[in-house]
Image (cartoon, rainbow, N blue to C red):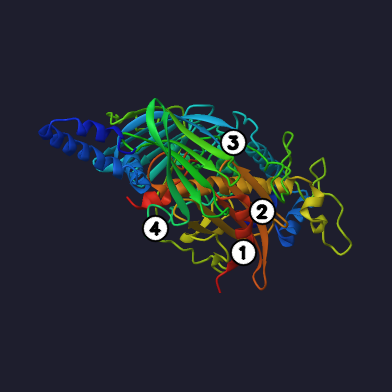
């Protein structure tokens, strides 16, 4: 599998593939490319991993370890994957660990009285991330291509897989909430705030 | 604390020389009390205690739905801020600060790790606004009642916002040291969105190196955050720089940055605004691949809003505002995000 195809597959996985990339993947699958299929199912597994499912012992992770007292699946610190790799498994526990996690951010929708939300983050078990409905149950390619040659991707995301778009948005918002807390924590420079999401006194911090 | 009314009675009934001495000592006692009536002075003492004193303690944090317990250690060693927070419930999470370096230590099976691929990474830009007063203009600061927190006499101080575009605060400060003992964040209705309170606190005690170091056994994952040496800008990042067309009175931009999200290698413009007390962040990225994404979420003190934005000749962008501000404010801000022409 070429690097370009691998990148297209990865882009498809996180809903960022354009028509060109999608076409590339579809053609490869139609041509019976087993490696593409295998990679696709590996990516699906990684997606399930990041949905919070337990990982099996056969999926070693590369993590940044600190010192000889840390042992992780027997992998030395040098096994850390570079960020630019599209290997989802190593990202699942990559060194980019977020801050302000002390309180345990959980999946919680906005309260009922919150205005205008499209967040229905219902997730009952592993969700195969195939928002465009391209792969049928057997993992093969659907033949729902329109006569013009454009495939099912022309269907808006929300209609094809209700919930997955919103789930992605919710996930991203959660990530940004953590990132905001990280920046606050670092810039506050002192005290337990805003680590514990505490009333943060940036002006007070600045006066020191 | 006002001068006790009995002073006149005491003084009048005494021998003149003794009366002189009594007056002098009473005046001396009176002066600090007067200073103690100044809420700004209280806040200064609070800042000082938080930064300069050595302490260890345990506190509770309530975000409107969840209650957590945390342990904290703080010391200044060789002029350097050292701090460690330990999450006592559920996942073993720790945060360790050493000067300008902050580390977070998690267990490898911590579900927080699932967010890591979606967050920009790299060194952080320092906030560049240094001119704000210790007491922000858009809040009234008032001394209120006396109380007792964690077994210590305390004084309550209220920070009341001028309008409902931001939240208010109630602080309880230790009488003796000014140390922050309890804090509430309030919305305009008076509802408490967040409560922080020390349950146990030892001030001015020796804190050991071991207490200030993270526990690292068991393959735990460690991530370091630090400030960038200089502002880094990605020359490949295309698109306009951004700003908020509307912010509540008193908010100014305190930081701006362009970051990359490691999993996707996409640039995210980040902005930061603060009024000296509250702050919010703005994230702007191309919405390619995520049409129609929108989301709102409030968690305790923090509101977050994500919306899609169409910019005439530039295409579609995904804008997210996150901060300790009311949801309505966040929504107004997100709708006002615009490119800097």
Q: Left or right: B340 with respect to A14?
A: left
The chain ID associated with circle 1 is B
Q: Are marks 3 and 2 on the same chain?
A: no
Estimate the x, y position of residue B20 in percent, counting from the top left. Answer: 13, 37
Mark 4 or 1, nearer chain start: 4
Q: Left or right: A163 with respect to B192?
A: right
Residue furthest to the right: A147
Q: Residue at x 30, y 38 (%)?
A: B3
Q: CA distance from mark 4 to mark 2?
A: 44 Å
Mark 1 or 3, nearer chain start: 3
Q: Left or right: B133 with respect to B314?
A: left
The chain ID associated with circle 2 is A
* Front in this rendered view, residue B193 or A135: B193
Residue under label 4: B132
Of badges 4 and 1, nearer the viewer stands 4
Q: Residue at x 70, y 42 (%)?
A: A38
Of badges 3 and 2, nearer the viewer stands 3
The chain ID associated with circle 3 is B
Estimate the x, y position of residue B241 in percent, counting from the top left. Answer: 54, 67
In the structure shown, which secondary structural element does the residue marked by tag 1 occupy?
helix
Q: Quadrant of the N terminus of chain B?
A: top left
Residue under label 2: A11
Estimate the x, y position of residue B311 in percent, counting from the top left. Answer: 66, 69
Residue under label 3: B64
The chain ID associated with circle 4 is B
Q: CA distance from mark 1 to mark 3?
A: 29 Å
Q: CA distance from mark 3 to mark 4?
A: 30 Å
Visible in this render: residue B266?
Answer: no
Visible in this render: residue B129?
Answer: yes
Q: Quadrant of the C terminus of chain B?
A: bottom right
């Amino acid at each position: 599998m070429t690097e370009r195809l691998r990148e297209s597959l990865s882009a498809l996985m996180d809903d960022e593939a354009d028509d060109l990339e999608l076409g590339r993947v579809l053609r490869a699958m139609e041509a019976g490319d087993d490696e593409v299929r295998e990679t696709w199912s590996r990516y699906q597994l990684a997606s399930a991993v990041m949905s919070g499912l337990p990982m099996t012992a056969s999926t070693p992770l590369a993590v940044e370890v600190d010192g000889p007292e840390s042992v992780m699946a027997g992998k030395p610190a040098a096994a850390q994957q570079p960020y630019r790799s599209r290997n989802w498994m190593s990202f699942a526990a990559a060194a980019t660990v977020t801050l302000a996690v002390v309180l345990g951010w959980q999946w919680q929708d906005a309260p009922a009285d919150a205005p205008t939300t499209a967040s229905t983050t219902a997730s009952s078990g592993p969700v195969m991330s195939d928002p465009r409905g391209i792969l049928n149950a057997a993992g093969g390619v659907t033949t729902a291509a329109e006569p013009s040659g454009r495939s099912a991707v022309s269907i808006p995301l929300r209609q094809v897989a209700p919930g997955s778009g919103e789930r992605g948005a919710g996930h991203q918002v959660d990530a940004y909430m953590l990132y905001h807390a990280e920046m606050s924590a670092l810039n506050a420079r002192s005290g337990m705030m805003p680590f514990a999401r505490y009333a943060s006194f940036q002006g007070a911090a600045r006066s020191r | 604390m006002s001068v006790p009314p009995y002073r006149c009675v005491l003084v009048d009934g005494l021998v003149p020389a003794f009366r002189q001495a009594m007056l002098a000592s009473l005046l001396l006692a009176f002066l600090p009390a007067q200073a103690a009536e100044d809420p700004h002075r209280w806040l200064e003492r609070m800042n000082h205690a938080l930064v300069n004193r050595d302490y260890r303690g345990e506190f509770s944090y309530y975000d409107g739905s969840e209650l957590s317990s945390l342990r904290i250690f703080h010391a200044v060693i060789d002029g350097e801020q050292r701090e460690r927070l330990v999450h006592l419930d559920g996942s073993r999470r720790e945060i360790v600060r050493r000067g300008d370096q902050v580390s977070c230590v998690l267990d490898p099976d911590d579900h927080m790790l699932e967010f890591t691929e979606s967050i920009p990474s790299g060194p952080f830009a320092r906030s560049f606004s240094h001119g704000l007063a210790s007491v922000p203009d858009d809040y009234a600061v008032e001394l209120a009642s006396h109380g007792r927190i964690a077994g210590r006499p305390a004084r309550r101080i209220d920070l009341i916002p001028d309008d409902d575009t931001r939240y208010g605060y109630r602080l309880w400060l230790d009488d003796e040291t000014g140390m922050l003992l309890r804090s509430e964040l309030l919305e305009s209705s008076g509802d408490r969105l967040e409560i922080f309170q020390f349950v146990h606190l030892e001030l001015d005690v020796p804190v050991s190196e071991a207490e200030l170091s993270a526990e690292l056994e068991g393959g735990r994952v460690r991530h370091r955050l630090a400030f960038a040496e200089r502002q880094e800008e990605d020359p490949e990042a295309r698109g306009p720089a951004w700003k908020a067309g509307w912010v509540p009175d008193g908010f100014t931009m305190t930081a701006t940055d362009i970051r990359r999200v490691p999993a996707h290698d996409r640039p995210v413009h980040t902005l930061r605004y603060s009024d000296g007390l509250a702050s919010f962040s703005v994230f702007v990225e191309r919405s390619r691949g995520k049409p129609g994404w929108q989301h709102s979420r409030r968690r305790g003190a923090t509101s977050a809003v994500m919306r899609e934005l169409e910019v005439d000749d530039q295409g579609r962008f995904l804008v997210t505002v996150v901060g300790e501000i009311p949801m309505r404010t966040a929504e107004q801000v997100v709708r006002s995000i615009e490119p800097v022409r």
